Image (spheres, helix red, strand yellow):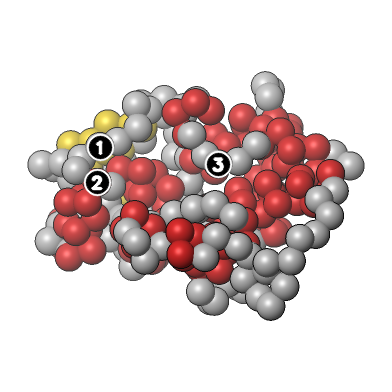
Amino acid sequence: MARYIGPVCRLCRREGTKLFLKGSRCFTEKCAVDRRSYPPGQHGQVRSRVSEYRTQLREKQKLKRIYGLLERQFRQYFFKADRKKGVTGENLLKLLESRLDNVIYRLGFASSRKQSRMLVRQNHFSVNGESVNIPSYLLNVGAVVSVREGSRNLLPIQSALEISGGRTPAWLTLDQGELKGEVKGAPTKEELALPVNEQLVVELYSR
């Protein structure tokens, strides 16, 4: 499967906002967006015309990069959200948030979604008592995510928990002593507070 292997800080600079792809580094003075708040490349500081299509495309790219998805996979999530009842944009955000790698990141077991995907593939987590190593695994309400017994002292997990301080979104609960969390409900748009206008993404795919 294809994957992006370049410097992720370039992605943040390209979108002109922090996408928090680098974990704790994004909160320090080393953050590339704070140091160079213009797009990468030799033409990064040249002004260009902003069209409606470009604005929609940039919003889609931001959302895709936040969750670490490639175009084909992202498009499949959009079509699935479009078939569900309700507002397509909000459905899309809920689907992306219910991915196993994202829930692990939100629970504080990983400092970034990229690290979370790596930990999932290495089989460090279980869902409802069953081992799962698929980052895109979708969690339903009531699902319990646990760190497996042999992975409880893993340095990346312990370090991430120290950084997060046990803080989790309202739609998740964390038992830090048992190293497990539960999905209590679906997140709302306000709770996510993402730097993305998902309605522009819907408009782009509806062209």
Q: Which residue is label 1 attached to? A: 167
Q: Residues within 10 Å of mark 3 (few under 14, many from 20)?
A: few
Q: Which of pointers 2 and 3 indicates the residue nearer the eye?
A: 3
Going by the numbered disc 1, the residue's amino acid type is: Arg
Q: Which residue is label 3 attached to? A: 195
Which corner quadrant holds the C terminus? top right
Where is residue 156? Give x, y as percent.
23, 63
User: As drawn, which residue projects farthest toward the right?
Assistant: 207
Q: Earlier in the sequence, mark 1 or mark 3?
A: 1
Q: Residues within 10 Å of mark 2 (few under 14, many from 20)?
A: some
Distance between the Cα atoms at labels 1 and 3?
20 Å
In the image, which disc is placed on residue 148?
none
Q: Residue at x 68, y 69 (%)?
A: 44
Q: Which residue is label 2 attached to? A: 164
Q: Residue at x 36, y 66 (%)?
A: 30
Label 2 near label 1: C-beta < 8 Å?
Answer: yes
